[in-house]
Amino acid sequence: MIKYLIIDDEFIAHDIIKGYCDILPNMELAKHCYDAIEAIEYLNSNSVDLIFLDLNMPKLKGFDFLKTLTNAPKVIVTTAYKEFALEGYELDISDYLLKPFSFERFLKAVNKATKTTEVKPVVTQVTNTTNTSERIFFHSNKKHIQVEISEILFIESDGNYSKIVLNTETISIREKVSDILDMLASKDFVQVHKSFAVAKQHIKSIEGNRIYIKEHIIPIGKMYKMNVNGLVK
């Protein structure tokens, strides 16, 4: 579970961020803080995994607050001011979201921030008496679809969209193949062509410049030969 803190002096910003987080299965709100002083007091006796931080706040500005932290958690800046982006990255923030931001952009920022911690991004483990599976939410056709990662056969670029090909269905989402791989944050997938990434466990055979997965034939690009060669060593 990812414990997060919202630091923003605008109530509507809290509502938007919490609303987005509520869609995700592994996000837990630690506290609403409406200025940096309140956040400092909370962090003196509590810890969180992730902070959503506004910059233009009363009493203490966002970056000034950030400089006071000795062991800062991951930080996603949420602000209307793009001119401070460079300073933010110098302070090692995870991402810089310009208000207003979409859920897709928010999701990408959360994945980026959490994939480098011990907590996995937007992927939650669901355990029952028979098996353990990892699942992820994809935004497709104005809704959020939860799929088991083990069901993904391969990912294919399709213009401005990418197709997530599963055992039983295909989902189209407005993301690049490389960004989807970042979202999955898994070593179980490998990019084999500029337009294709495959799930290693579903590869039936590799013949010449082709990969066979069930009834599908996936081309191997020249630039990605080394990735494929690494699978058969």
Image (tube, rainbow, N blue to C red):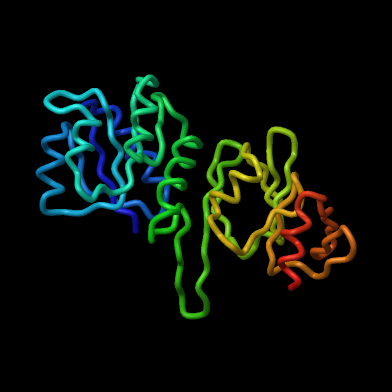
Q: Can you see residue 183?
A: yes
Q: Which residue occupies the foreground of this view, 9 or 219? A: 219
With 117 as the anchor, is 15 left or right in this view?
left
In the rendered image, the vertical position of residue 19 relative to residue 126, given as above or below: above
Residue at the spot 76% in from the left edge and 71% down from the top edge: 232
In the rendered image, the vertical position of residue 170 relative to residue 65, given as above or below: below
Report x, y in % for residue 90.
Answer: 35, 35
Residue at the spot 17% in from the left edge and 32% down from the top edge: 34
With 48 as the anchor, is 187 left or right in this view?
right
Examine the image and state in which quarter residue 79 appears: top left
Examine the image and state in which quarter residue 229 appears: bottom right
Q: Quadrant of the C terminus?
A: bottom right
In the rendered image, the vertical position of residue 15 relative to residue 47, given as above or below: above
Residue at the spot 27% in from the left edge and 27% down from the top edge: 55
Tell which residue pokes out farthest to the bottom in this image: 129
Q: Which residue occupies the foreground of this view, 99 or 139? A: 99
Q: Quadrant of the N terminus?
A: bottom left
Q: Which residue occupies the foreground of this view, 152 or 39? A: 39
Q: Which residue occupies the foreground of this view, 44 or 199? A: 44
Report x, y in % for residue 223.
Answer: 77, 49
Residue at the spot 41% in from the left edge and 24% down from the top edge: 100
